[in-house]
Amino acid sequence: MKKLGERQTKIFCQLIDGIKRGHEYVRILNGDRMPLDVVIVNDVFEWPFNGRSAQEYELCQYYDINGDVVRDPLMAFVVLDGRTKEHPESSLVDVYPYKFEKGLPYVLTQSIQVINEDVYQIDRSLQRAQAITAENWLDALSEQGFLEQLQKGNIDEADEDDGDDDE
């Protein structure tokens, strides 16, 4: 399987590191550009190929048409994160794109079929193409200033408490 290149893995790590402890996602705002959501999809699970701990993330940009949210795009990733406090280097992280989804026209491709934390089937050719797409998108996000906006705190975060405190 093709993992992200070194530069794109570093960008990806900066994005996922922007999710604060206790939160499930961060939305990065960047002026007139579509926001970028960085989402933890599930709890840590054992990656069946090598027994390492893995976690699933999604990156998603979207726009609104008549009240409907249209993904443009959403990509999902399996991440094997070997970093520690003593060794925070992104070179210890393997990122495998496996899903691409887009709104109009609707497109969904999934190269790794993951159900209940078990891998059932891998389309290696499609996964390679998704990795190339992800690398190009991550480079574009970096060039468009999303990392700088994250560092400046230009974000919207999910609260741990989903209750309505406005009343």
Image: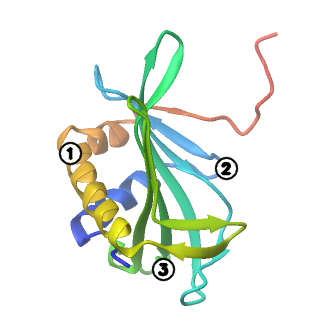
Compared to 135, does 30 lie above or below?
A: above
Of marks 2 and 3, which one's residue comes earlier in the chain?
2
- Residue 70 placement, left or right of 30: right
Q: Label 3, label 1: how many angstroms apart (C-alpha)?
A: 26 Å
**Quarter of the figure with the N terminus:** bottom left
User: What residue is drawn where x is 67% and y is 35%?
Assistant: 159
Label number found at residue 110: none
Q: Is residue 73 above or below residue 58?
A: above
Look at the image and tell me whether residue 90 can be seen. Answer: yes
39 over 53 or under it: above or below:
above
Residue plotted at (33% across, 71% down): 125
Identify which residue is drawn at 27% across, 41% down.
148
Say which element carries label 1: helix
Residue 40: x and y in percent read: 58, 53
Report which residue position mark 3 lands on. Answer: 82
Question: What is the crowding at mark 1: few (fewer than 14 residues within 10 Å), some, or many (at least 20)?
Answer: few
Percent across and percent down for residue 163 are 80, 27
> Would residue 17 be seen by someone viewing this image from the given angle?
no
Instruction: State the residue lying farthest toward the bottom.
Output: 50
Nearer the viewer's eye, disc 2 or disc 3?
3
Residue type, numbered disc 1: Ala
Say whether marks 3 and 1 touch (CB < 8 Å). no
Q: Which mark is residue 140?
A: 1
- Helix, strand or loop at label 3? It is loop
Residue 14 at what x, y percent from top left? 37, 56
| Above or below, 116 relative to 68 | below
Amino acid at circle 2: Gly
Mark 3 or mark 1: whose residue is earlier in sequence:
3
Q: Nearer the viewer, mark 3 or mark 1?
A: 1
10 Å crowding of disc 3: few (<14), some (14-19), many (20+): some
Checking the image for residue 22, the label placed there is: 2
Residue ID at (29%, 63%): 129
